Amino acid sequence: MRSITRAGLRAIGLLAATGALCAAATVPAMAGEPGTTWQPELSEGTGNGVVVSSDGARFDRSTAFGAPADEGDTESSADPAEVVPTGLLTLAPRTLDTPTREVDSRLVADTPPGSTASVDVRGKRAGGGWTEWIPAEGSRTELPEAVTEVQGRLVLTATGSAGPTVREVTLTATPSAGAEGEPLTEAAPRSYSVFATREGLVGGTTANGHKIVNRDRFVALPSRRALSANGKTDYSVKVCAPNGRCAIAPVWDIGPWNTKDDYWNPSNQRQMWKDLPQGVPQAAAARNGHNGGKDQFGRKVANPAGIDLGDGIFWDVLGLKDNSQVQVDYLWTGSQRLSAIRTEGAPDVQILARPEAGAESVGIAVDATEVPVQCTSGAFVRIGDGQYLPTTAFAGLPGDVPACDAPAAPAAPTPSDASAAGPTPAAPSAPGASAAPGGSAAPAASGGSTAPAASGGTAAQAAAGSAAPAAPAGPAASPAPGGSATSPGPGGSAISPAPGGSAGAAGSPAPATPSAPAGVAPAAPAPSPSGADRPGTGAPAAGGSTPTPAPTSDVPDGASQAARVMPGSAQRAPSGTP
């Protein structure tokens, strides 16, 4: 539906005369096309930034969140992308008689100047999980595989004084030539080592309408394609710190930095920044000059963050005291069997190091999240190496889960992302870091340890004596130095920066590089000599407070982001900092 809106915005004279654009009048008739057609009830939809009344689904500025305008999603543009208040309304799903991979969307909508109305679509996989939300191109959405259940989501934006109103949505699913896709093997989810920052902003509102509470437990990723609805856990991640502690938590917000950067997808499938290697957040590449060192909003990127963590995840679960490199599994991207957690009213359940009562905790899984189910060991289920949950923690388990002592099947490869994206170039390296030729690991200056190879090459340690930490599931290691524990939270991130304390001055770690599949130690960012020994912002103790070091003054002009919070929302627009 985006092309309809753009056409309407260009016809300013016509809009001034009519006062509104009826989107249905510009969509070609679909007579003669086969398929299943239905009109979702707008009153049954849920979301944030949209109010449904007898007149239809109306944009609600008071609860909208900040996101980039569609007109600004050309990364080659020299001008900062415009940020507009955005509302989302998730519609009821529809079960089809025949599989489909293509859904056509038509809107009857009033879109005054400066406003847009469009549709995202997703489908439920044969294994039970959802595909990501795919924005409609023109009026059509192509899903990544054949499905028999689809769901639509309205996306409303407004920059002018008047917002859009959608009166009717018509969706048509075209029968697919192939059968519904069945996972042939159980493949692990995509997993990358990225830089994490703390979300903060207690009392604010996330992109899905969740009100942030003290020590909250959720994450933010820089794309609405993987945004779960408020209270839902359709899209969850497992994030592991260098000390070996892990958290399985839902994606409830958009950010940090960019809001159209689904970097975990193959390069040719990314919504923006298709020139970057898979697994490299644009913020990480910007730290090495990509897009002139700026994000999609035109702001100077102050740290290479690819994920924001709620305070409870950051402090209480992972035990982080400062921004850190972490390993993230994007659980919806694999074909492993997933089962939902049931905590009987508790916010989460402890992940144990061994399949026995009283074993030490190595992390948590948030209530209702779906976790990987590998095998059973007595009254426990293994969900990862050295990670177990009691069977009583699950709402239900598949009947064919093998025993952990059964002969192991050959490991299935991660989904063929590399073949879809083509050859992956070497990830950007930190200033001053040298790459090892031939894709081999470059040894550290001392200690003889090596960093694992990234795609096409490996960044060597930048400072003498530094070495890559162990994989998240391994022995305890110190978090990566550099930066404060507070993210600048631009664009779509719900975070309040500390004045002058944002990471990403001379002491920022190097951008994250695509990691090897889960279980292989990720390369750590090399600390900068000027910031390696600078204290970070410590986590306040649960029962008291920890003194915060005075803000440092070594942040260059333009690095600190003065955030502007959207009304009623934790999302923020560009600071205007050059």
Image (tube, rainbow, N blue to C red):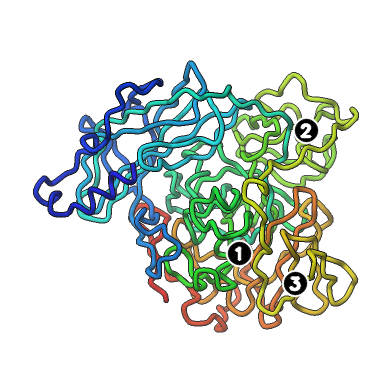
Q: Residue drawn at (80%, 53%), measured in percent from left and top?
A: 520
Q: Residue drawn at (66%, 77%), measured in percent from left and top?
A: 431
The amino acid at mark 2 is Gln
- Residue 92 against residue 306 in the figure, above or below: above
Q: Position of residue 26 (x, y in %)?
A: 23, 38
Q: Secondary structure at mark 2?
A: loop
Which tag, 1 or 2, sits closer to the chain's start? 2
Q: Secondary structure at mark 1?
A: loop
Q: Position of residue 300 (x, y in %)?
A: 48, 72
Q: Is residue 351 visible?
A: yes
The amino acid at mark 3 is Ala
Name the residue that disc number 3 marks: 435
Inter-mark Cα distance, 1 to 2: 40 Å
Name the residue that disc number 2 marks: 374
The amino acid at mark 1 is Ser
Q: Residues within 10 Å of mark 3 (few under 14, many from 20)?
A: many
State if disc 3 and disc 1 touch (CB < 8 Å). no
Q: Which mark is residue 313?
A: none
- Residue 128 against residue 222 in the figure, above or below: above
- Residue 63 against residue 556 in the figure, above or below: above
Q: Quadrant of residue 210?
A: top left
